[in-house]
Structures are given as structure tokens and as C-alpha cells.
Image: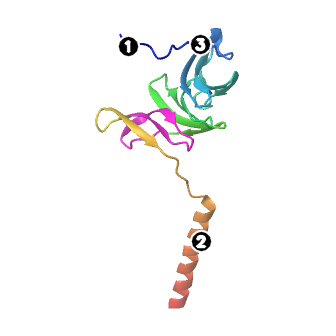
Amino acid sequence: MPALAQIYVCTTIDDPLATNGQAVVYGISSNGVLSGRYFDATGSYAFIDDNGTVTAVDDPSYPGRATGGGLSDSNTVAGFDSAYGGRQQIGFVSSDGNLTYLAYLADPLAEPNYTVAEGVDDSATAVGICDAASDAGENGFIATEESVPEPAPIAMLTAGIAGITVARRRCQN
């Protein structure tokens, strides 16, 4: 029998926000910050535990149904909400209280709202699983943040094209 190189000592994590200390840890950053889920009388909530300072991560659309998974070194949490009585999972990334859904981003043929984010890096790139209707099974995904054009530049572009069109018609007459 090979010799053990190390002995691990387990420490129970009791979340002070939880009922009876019920907490589950799913992620840890390289600087020891934890993420997971705690339970109380109203549901389950994702959390970040930074050396005893606990911050709840909850989605106002689905209160009391969040699970925190992976955690980046910048304390961005990947997780999911259990919606509609747990029949659908909606993946999210939460950073500094700003929650972004990942639903429909993983696979355009995925079942409605079935994405589970399980990991995230410091650039908010998330990984996880989605249920793909295309092959009747689960697939992995990677979701990267993309910038969305601001409405003002789009409106200015539309106005510019309209102005050019009007000017062109006037020149033709």
C-alpha cells in the first residue's frame, strides 16, 4: 500500500445566515473565498463567504432558489436558479451584485432555460452544462461575455442613413 503524502483535515462550514447552519460549499477561489448555497425557512440562496463575511447572492425573479457554484478570484460567482418548482435551471453569473443570465446562450437548441453554470474565471467566462434538445442529452458549454451596442450609436447610424437617403433623393430631382 503506498504511503500517504498528506492528511486532509475537514472543517465543517456553518453559514450564519442558514437555518441550523445548513450550508453546502461548491467553489473556492485561490485566496480561500468560498461559494455555495445555504438554506433557511424561505428557500435556498447562493452565497460568498470571505473569511466569515457572508454575502447572499439571490435573484429577485426567483427568490430563495439560487445555488452558487464556481467562484473566480475576483469573487464572480457562477450558479443557477431553480425555477418553476425546480423543473428548469437558469444559469447565471453574478459579480458585485450584478446578475447576468446564461439561459439560451449555451445551445440554441437547448431546452428552455436549462443551463447550469458550474465554473467561472476572472474574465466572467462561464462553463457548465445545458440540456440539448438536438441530441436528447446534456452538453458542456462555455459562455463568454459580449458587448452589446449602445442604443445611441445605433440611433445615430439610422438617422445618418435616413439623412443620406433624403439628400440623395433631392439630388436626383
Query: In front here: 166 or 133?
Result: 133
Q: Which residue is mark 1?
A: 2
Note whether residue 173 is visible. Answer: no
Q: Secondary structure beneath disc 1?
A: loop
Which residue sits at x=54%, y=90%? 171
In the displayed structure image, the side of residue 124 where residue 114 appears, left or right: left
Q: Specify the segment rendered in magenta.
A: 103-130
Q: Secondary structure beneath disc 2?
A: helix
Note whether residue 38 is visible. Answer: yes
Query: In front here: 122 or 117?
Result: 122
User: Is residue 172 highlighted in magenta?
Assistant: no
Foreground label between 3 and 1: 1
Which callout, 3 or 1, points at the residue further toward the start of the chain? 1
Amino acid type of disc 1?
Pro
Which residue sits at x=47%, y=29%? 89
Which residue sits at x=52%, y=47%? 145
Q: Residue furthest front?
A: 3
In the displayed structure image, the side of residue 48 where residue 136 appears, left or right: left
Which callout, 3 or 2, points at the residue further toward the start of the chain? 3
Amino acid type of disc 3?
Thr
Q: Which residue is mark 3?
A: 11
Foreground label between 1 and 2: 1
Which residue sits at x=41%, y=39%? 141
The spot of residue 157 in percent (x, y) is 57, 69
Q: Secondary structure beneath disc 3?
A: loop
Quadrant of the snapshot with the N terminus:
top left
